[in-house]
Amino acid sequence: MYLVRPPYLLKKLYPKAVWRMSATQKIIYLTFDDGPVSEITPWVLDLLKEKNINATFFCVGENVQKNPEIFQRIKEEKHTTGNHTFNHVNGWNTHTADYLENVEKCAADNPTSLFRPPYGKLKKSQYHMLGAQYSIIMWDVLSGDYDKDTTPEKCLENVLKHVRNGSVIVFHDSYKAQKKLKYALPRFIDWALSREYEFAVL
């Protein structure tokens, strides 16, 4: 179970985090979590290159170490990267010192000013300490592509129904999201471009 748009109370927990960018312009922000991984991330990069779009990739440190050439391609093609911890750690279930160490381990291979907590879960102590070092990026629209009970069609519907000016949209360049991502992402991009949205990086 997930909420496509984050509830007001969740936003109140992390008031300085970025949930949505400026609504004054028709710009949206594609983000991808959990990569880079073979096959999936290159497919995303090929699509973005074809459409002349840049995005932000929140990378898991161990995947960066396993796929350094794909990570390098992300940067070479002018996408931005964010820290997504080294092992996709749940902050609520992790001692703060251990969590911060995991973040720093990811930062060794992926120096960046952006951080997104896996599952959107941070303890207050983690939030305050990481907020001093990073822009904490949450989301305005969650595609649900990672959810085993969500169909590809529903994933696309989630994004089409909720996107708006300034939306920070989450997809996943991961194996479990593969089928839904490959269905929803190109259709969403074509829809957005046909309605004169622009895409930008965080």
Image: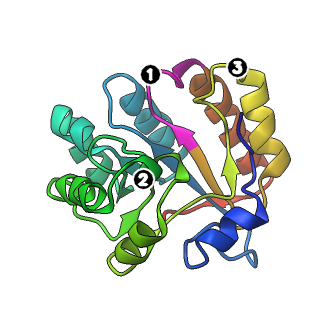
Three-letter code for the amino acid on which mark 2 is drawn: Gly
Figure check: 79 above or below 130: above
Q: What residue sits right under mark 2 in the picture?
A: 91
Q: What residue sits right under mark 1 in the picture?
A: 175
Task: Name the residue rendered at 56%, 40% in the picture.
Answer: 171
Task: Name the residue rendered at 76%, 59% in the picture.
Answer: 7
Three-letter code for the amino acid on which mark 1 is drawn: Tyr
Tell me the element at label 2.
helix
**In the image, is 138 to the left or to the right of 117?**
right
Q: What residue sits right under mark 3 in the picture?
A: 149
Tell me the CA gap for discs 2 and 3: 24 Å
User: Which of the two discs, 2 and 3, labels the residue nearer the N terminus?
Assistant: 2
Figure check: 134 above or below 168: below
Indicate yes or no whether the magenta region holds residue 178: yes
Q: Can you give x and y, in whole percent of width and height, for residue 57 in the image?
A: 41, 50
Figure check: 154 above or below 3: above
Which region of the structure is painted magenta? 171-179
Task: Name the residue rendered at 42%, 77% in the picture.
Answer: 128
Quarter of the view holding residue 182: top right
Mark closer to the observer (2, 1): 2
Task: Name the residue rendered at 52%, 22% in the picture.
Answer: 178
Tell me the element at label 3.
loop
Mark closer to the observer (2, 3): 2
- 124 or 71, which is in the foreground? 124
- State how the image is colored: rainbow
Q: Can you give x and y, in whole percent of width and height, for residue 180 in the image?
A: 62, 23
